[in-house]
Image (cartoon, grey):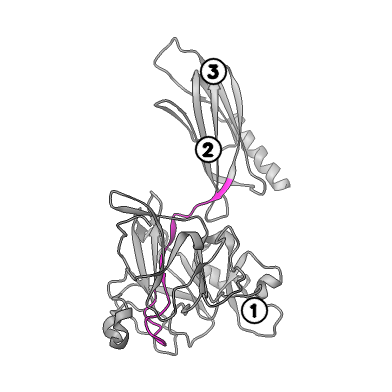
Amino acid sequence: MKKFFNYALALLAVALVSPVFVACDDDDDVKTYNLTIELVLPEGVQSINDLEITAVKGAKVVNITQNALKATVEKLPQGTYEITAKAKVADDATAKVQGAAKVDLYADQVVKIPLSLFYESPLIFKAIYTAGGKAGYTQDGYFEIVNNSDEVQYLDQLVLLYASAAQKAANAWQASGVTDIYYQGQGPVVAFPGSGKDYPIQPGQSVVIANDATNHKEADPDGADNHSDLSKADWEIYLDYSKMGDVDFEAPNLSAIFYNNEYMRAFALGFFNGAYVLAKLPVTPEEYAANESSYSTTPGTTSQTRYMGIASKYVLDAVEAWDRDDEEHYPFFLPKDDAHAVTAAVGWSGKCIRRKVTKIENGRAYYKDTNSSADDFLTDQPQTPGVTPTAVD
């Protein structure tokens, strides 16, 4: 709590010593007044970044870019204003705050705007195919990530984590009280290369990440009807350490920053269920992997097998798929990341789970993202890697 008060006082001090905002109007006869805006952070939020405050009166817009919880606009022409405020929560990949108020400005006023917390990710899973096209064939899986925002994003250093998460009760970490860190299953944690802005992804653009970037219809003719041609995939997960002999195809590679089973031949083996994480870490993936605090052995056991964990606050998107044959389920993710799992595609069916489309504008699809996979995804869908949907679901 002390940290919060120190932060608020610091911002207030900035507001008091910073230049005030002056609004101009072409009509000298219009009366003007001062408007002071005070923002109230929601409980638990201590620090924000990239604060934007906007005051709109008809066609006139006043942008208040001062990064403080209190700001004053001087000599604002009288009238009715719609005030909106939005900011990012510090140290959280998707948490944001927003608030709004309507002000009838016919005298100097102070308006307080309570901010509410919400979660919004620019990069999300568009489709996940791990069901397998034929029993025992593990290489034809793929993930598709889409930029669901209206701004350029970057794939650099993003991390993918898979956990075999179908549970009828709390897992060992949850049972020990650790609910906000998600630990991998058997297999690797992989990351995109790049130094920060080497791999841009445009608004509406998606990329396909294949386990093996080859034409699986030709590689496995017996399962051709259920396999995909992934020879044009944008990225590939090449496991150079695998004792099963993984093949390096032409697509650029994601790197394994950690693995705990050298006999895995594919990144994810979620043929009947699974939990999938897309994350942005506060340090480079390599630095994160070198930190011993990033790992845990299984609580309550003597096993020495290590598992990498990623905290909820670093998660951009989380999707859990439950085994359709299980009658009991215990959620792997916190509700803020995935409130309810989707039913997994039928194992060995060659089908995928795909995110629903909410609207299409100028040929671009926008995807549903309520942080509830049961609501956001369709199951048992045809594989269409790289294809933009043409209809709203």
Q: Please tell me which residue is depicted at 33% across the width and 79% down the height of the picture.
A: 226
Between the residue at mark 2 and the residue at mark 1, the CA separation in whole angstroms equals 43 Å
Q: Position of residue 116 (x, y in %)?
A: 59, 44
Most distant residue in the right direction = 2
For disc 1, the marked residue is: 297
- Looking at the rendered structure, the kind of residue marked 3 is Tyr
From this viewpoint, is residue 207 visible? yes
Magenta-highlighted residues: 117-142
The tag earlier along the polypeptide, 1 or 3, is 3
- Real-space CA distance between mark 2 and mark 3, rounded to the nearest whole angstrom: 20 Å
- Disc 1 marks a residue whose amino acid type is Thr
Percent from the top left, x then y, of residue 356? 41, 59
Furthest residue in direction top, as rendered: 29
Q: Could you say whether the residue bearing mark 2 is in a helix, strand or loop?
A: strand
Q: Which residue was labeled with disc 3?
A: 33
Image vertical order of residue 159 relative to residue 237, above or below: above
Q: Does the stretch in magenta take in 231? A: no
Q: Position of residue 165 (x, y in %)?
A: 56, 74
Disc 2 residue type?
A: Ala
Image position of 331 (left or right of 359): right
Name which of mark 2 and mark 3 comes first in the sequence: 3
Q: Quadrant of residue 12?
A: top right
Calculate the distance from the C-alpha at mark 1 to the C-alpha at mark 3.
62 Å
Can you identify the residue that label 2 sits on?
85
Badge 3 density bin: few <14, some 14–19, many ≥20, Cα 10 Å: some
What residue is rendered at 47% in x and 69% in y?
160
Query: Is residue 119 within the magenta segment?
Result: yes
- Are discs 2 and 1 less than 8 Å apart at CB? no
Within 10 Å of disc 2 (Cα), the crowding (few <14, some 14-19, many 20+) is many
